[in-house]
């Protein structure tokens, strides 16, 4: 399903990532999934959290630069070629992927994906009977 994701822009220096997780932990906000992309000067921490609106406000109060965007969360079998088959669905529908990240537990892989047309991607996944994951389900992992 379409869920909210936080993107936090961080200076690339020791301790900044810890500060984000410390603030969230102290506010009883759980991080279900995250990814860090960096350059020599800054990084982008993307994460799915249990209370995205509250997390955004708390981080802004601590002077972090935070944006909220929408991603799609879905599951695929944790087997060779499964993600390729899923991405082929989007390619056939001419949906461009901006980025994705994921993790696996047991026999399933869980993916968060940002694309240029989330509504169309959800419709395509539903049409192909893909397992879409809601935010509340993702918070359980």
Image (cartoon, rainbow, N blue to C red):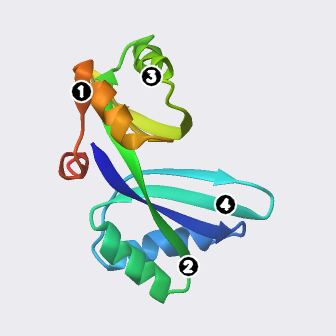
Please state which of residues 12 and 53 is positioned toward the viewer in this rendering.
53
Q: Give the residue drawn at x 24%, y 51%.
A: 135
Residue hosting label 4: 43
Q: Which mark is residue 93?
A: 3
Image location of residue 140, percent across then percent down: 20, 49
Mark count: 4
> Between disc 4 and disc 2, whose residue precedes?
4
Separation of marks 2 and 1 at Cα, in angstroms: 36 Å
Q: Quadrant of residue 38?
A: bottom right
- Badge 3 local density, few (<14 within 10 Å), some, or many (20+)? few
Separation of marks 1 and 4 at Cα, in angstroms: 34 Å
Helix, strand or loop under label 3: loop
Q: Is residue 67 shown left or right of residue 55?
A: right
Image location of residue 44, percent across then percent down: 61, 59
Residue with the most extreme top position: 81
> Between disc 3 and disc 1, whose residue precedes?
3
Residue hosting label 2: 64
Helix, strand or loop under label 1: helix
From this view, report whether residue 70 is shown above or below residue 111. Answer: below
Residue hosting label 1: 126
């Amino acid at each position: 399903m379409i869920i909210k994701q936080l993107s936090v822009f961080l200076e690339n220096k020791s301790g900044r990532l810890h500060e984000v997780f410390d603030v969230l932990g102290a506010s009883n906000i759980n991080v279900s999934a995250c990814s860090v992309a960096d350059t020599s000067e800054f990084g982008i921490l993307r994460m799915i959290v249990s209370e995205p609106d509250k997390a955004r406000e708390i981080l802004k109060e601590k002077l972090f630069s935070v944006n909220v965007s929408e991603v799609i969360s879905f599951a695929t079998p944790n087997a060779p070629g499964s993600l390729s088959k899923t991405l082929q669905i989007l390619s056939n529908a001419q949906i461009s992927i901006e980025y994705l990240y994921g993790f696996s537990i047991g026999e399933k892989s869980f993916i968060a994906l940002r694309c240029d047309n989330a509504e169309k991607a959800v419709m395509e996944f539903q049409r192909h009977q893909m397992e879409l994951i809601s935010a509340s389900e993702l918070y359980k992992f």
